[in-house]
Image (cartoon, rainbow, N blue to C red):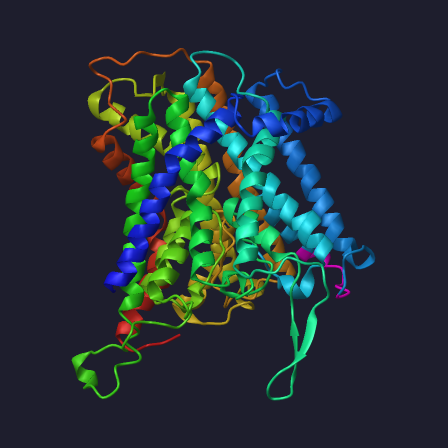
Amino acid sequence: MTTNGWIQILLYFGVLTVLTRPLGGFIYRVLEGKPTFIGRVLGPVERGFYKLAGVKPDAEQHWTTYTLAMLVFNLVCFVTLYVLQLTQKHLPLNPQGMDNLTPDLAFNTAISFITNTNWQSYGGESTMSYLTQMLGLTVHNFVSAATGIALAMALVRGFARRSGKTLGNFWVDLTRTTLYILLPLSIVAALFLIWQGMPQNLGAYTDVATLEGAKQTIAQGPVASQIAIKMLGTNGGGFFNANAAHPFENPNSISDFLQIILIFLIPAALTNVFGRMVKSELQGWAIYSAMAVVFLAGVTTLYWAESQGNPAFPAMGIDQSAGALQPGGNMEGKEARFGIARSALFATITTDASCGAVNGMHDSFTPLGGMVPMINIQLGEVIFGGVGSGLYGMLLYAIIAVFIAGLMVGRTPEYVGKKIEAKEVKMTMLAILCLPASILGFTALAAVLPQGLAGLNNSGPHGFSEILYAFTSATGNNGSAFAGLTANTPFYNLLLAAAMMIGRFAFIVPMMAVAGSLVAKKYTHPSAGTFPTDGGLFISLLVGVLLIVGGLTFFPALALGPIVEHLSLQAGTLY
């Protein structure tokens, strides 16, 4: 751990905090239909979309109608992306002649991109045509992210509105989010990345001769346009198999810093949107602070773990009995251009959010270092989290927190003026518990079946960690992996697709039921007995509930994987 490393981490956090409020104000105005500078330019385009689609922008929807519209939209997205992958060989913009995908891989990939997971059981530059990358994957990066933001706004309206029956209009929220927020920010980010050296073209791959006289094929294509939205929309699906460790996806330190800013940019800003909508920005800063505490704890732990080095490689020239570790820390699996601090920061950010982009190899981290990204996802990816999904996930934990506080003081709990009663708590727990049920259930299945064990590259606890991480990532809609697992098999493609659907839609439906119940409740003015939810006590309670409810559920599984591997490593046993 170095001073330079800590400066980079604190600089990142400072920039993120400064950007949170102004972007939050802009998003708030867009989603509430208030005038904005960009609205004067794109307003006719928005109205044209509504006219074409037959949408009445002033007609709001009940929570069931809102949810049904979202589900139907995602079903259509799935079918179109699935068919595109099965027919890409016969379609244009395929200069490398990429073949059609197998049905199970196309199914897995289509589910992956509509759920904002972007799990990749394929190598992008060797599998997908330019048309599939642009019309299929990049488009779904936009709409899956916009869906998450729209759903978060529906829940926030449930808290913010004094009393009513509707939560907004899904088609309006989807259109405004895409047109006014995601598209302009992505264009600016893509142009910046092109300036930094990222390719953006439709040319065929280039064959060159190396200095040794060998032939090398340099893959390229419409890279910048996909990378901008993969980061901004917390999607994470790389154009190249090496993802953000590829020099075309991450040319230099400046592009690396921009990409990790983009990952947290909208999730952080949405906390401010929440505060504005409930008429108290302090409420938004309380949510932001809880997320920030867990984020900083995670990056500190990961940075420390990877800076310690690997005890299996003692420092040369030093008595091994003294326990001296390899000098410089554990550099295996790190982005060598940027060092341990930036790889630790990137890994923490990408697993705090539902992004999954990587500039290092989590499978090569030390056992405790690899455990941090795993825990980040298992907590529900609410540490800023995905665009929209991080906020609505954390708000459900806030419901649990105030419910526990209410039990302690013996009165009906309230949160931002809405009483939290049995229905909200039941639906909240149903949403939260579907995640460990999927992660632990599918992991147990894969750990005992021959089809699951056949994909392992390592034995013992590390092999178990590879399986556990895969289903953690899929259910958490993250998309990163312990890449030692061979997942491109019918068994894993179908099981991981099922985990992705549970993590996205089985969570969303009860969450929307909570929103529908809350919006019908009348606003309750705070009294002397109301538990304040905008101060340090609530932040501490929220962090505690997150760690206890979210974390302890997975402790037995973690004990079988990274924890026992760490103890074995200290004893000199490798896997």
Whether residue 134 is situated above or below residue 365 in the rendered picture: above
Looking at this view, is 302 or 439 the one in front? 302
Q: For residue 102: magenta?
A: yes
The total number of labels drawn is: 0
Q: For residue 325: magenta?
A: no
- Give the residue at the far left of this rendering: 322
Q: Quadrant of residue 412?
A: top left
Whole-percent x and y of residue 251? 50, 63
Q: Is residue 68 visible?
A: no
Q: Is residue 220 visible?
A: yes
Q: Quadrant of the N terminus?
A: bottom left
Whole-percent x and y of residue 255? 47, 57
Q: Main secondary structure of the magenta part?
A: loop
Tell whether 85 sits left or right of 485: right
Whole-percent x and y of residue 300? 28, 56
Tell whether 223 sits left or right of 99: left
Looking at this view, is 439 or 166 the one in front? 166
Whole-percent x and y of residue 167? 53, 20
Q: Quadrant of the C terminus?
A: bottom left
Q: Which residue occupies 56% across, 36% down?
A: 146
- Give the residue at the far right of this rendering: 90
Q: Which residue occupies 20% across, 14% down?
A: 528
Tell whether 146 sits left or right of 375: right
Instruction: Give, as a single range, the part of the protein colored magenta.
Output: 96-105
Looking at this view, is 11 or 467 the one in front? 11
